[in-house]
Image (spheres, rainbow, N blue to C red):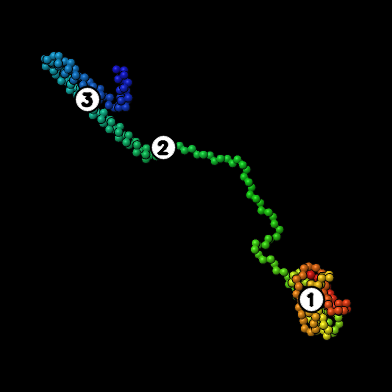
Amino acid sequence: MHTAALHLAPILGAEKSKVPFYVAGGVLVGWALVVSLGVGLRRTDFPGTATLERAVIAVTAVLVLAAASTAVITSGSAAKAGSEAGSKQPAAAAGGSTSAPTTSTPASSPTTASTPAPQPKATTGAPAAPGSPAPASATTSLTLLANPEGLLSYNAKQLSAKSGTVTIDFKNNAPLEHDVTVAQGSTVLGKTPTFRGGSRMLTLKLKPGTYVFYCSVPGHRQAGMEGTLNVS
């Protein structure tokens, strides 16, 4: 009995609402076995008397009624329990399912100090734009005259120019032939042709410095046809 109770305990616990039906049905089956097998086979004249017959019929009717009643009650309780379970399930679905907890990974703290942005270097003046052409060299135009009366002299002893291209427009309206020669030290840098009447031009590329100009006709420089050209 103890072993049977252990095996029946889970079933009875799972279906508590059907216990009354099982009890009433068991009693009815037991009563039927007692009446038919236990007494009816042994006593051919059972129930014997009218009173006992009515008692047997009454007990049987009561047990049948009890079994039927408990069957109806327990079936209704099971249906109600099923409907409640069905109503709870959509309610849970409508209310929102319980999601698995998520663990957020905390942001890792910086292990090294941030490198400060490099500061722009100070500059003096506005740098030239990349690819811009170099400034053009200066161009200086000078005019030099020979003494028209035939004296061995120029109209100027000092000339000034900017470094770069220097052009000397030499005019000779004197009765003698003259030229203009430009030199630095003992190095002759250029000269005009020796001529009389008209003008000639001498163009040179000169760096800053001091130069000398003179007439290269023999004896004319010695007589005073010379001067200084300052280039800055």
Residue at 24 percent of width and 26 percent of height: 70
Residue 145 visible in this rendered orientation of the protein: no
Q: What is the count of numbered marks?
A: 3
Q: What residue type is labelled 2?
A: Thr
Per the model, the C-alpha gap separating discs 2 and 1 is 106 Å
The residue where tag 1 is placed is 191
- Mark 2 or mark 1, whichever is nearer to me: 1
The residue where tag 2 is placed is 98
Q: Earlier in the sequence, mark 3 or mark 2?
A: 3
Residue at 79 percent of width and 82 percent of height: 195
Per the model, the C-alpha gap separating discs 3 and 2 is 44 Å
The residue where tag 3 is placed is 67
Residue 55 shows which numbered tag?
Answer: none
Report the side of 139 relative to 225 (left or right). Answer: left
Where is residue 171 shown, x and y percent of the image?
A: 79, 81
Secondary structure beneath disc 2?
loop
Q: What residue type is labelled 3?
A: Ala
Residue at 84 percent of width and 84 percent of height: 149
For residue 197, above or below residue 57: below
Q: Earlier in the sequence, mark 3 or mark 1?
A: 3
- Kindly indicate the quadrant of the structure image that contains residue 88: top left
Is the residue marked by circle 1 packed among few (<14), some (14-19), or many (20+) residues within 10 Å? many
Report the side of 30 relative to 191 (left or right). Answer: left
Report the side of 127 relative to 155 (left or right). Answer: left
Q: Which amino acid does label 1 sit on?
A: Lys
Secondary structure beneath disc 1?
strand
Q: In this orientation, which residue lies closer to the viewer: 61 or 213?
A: 213
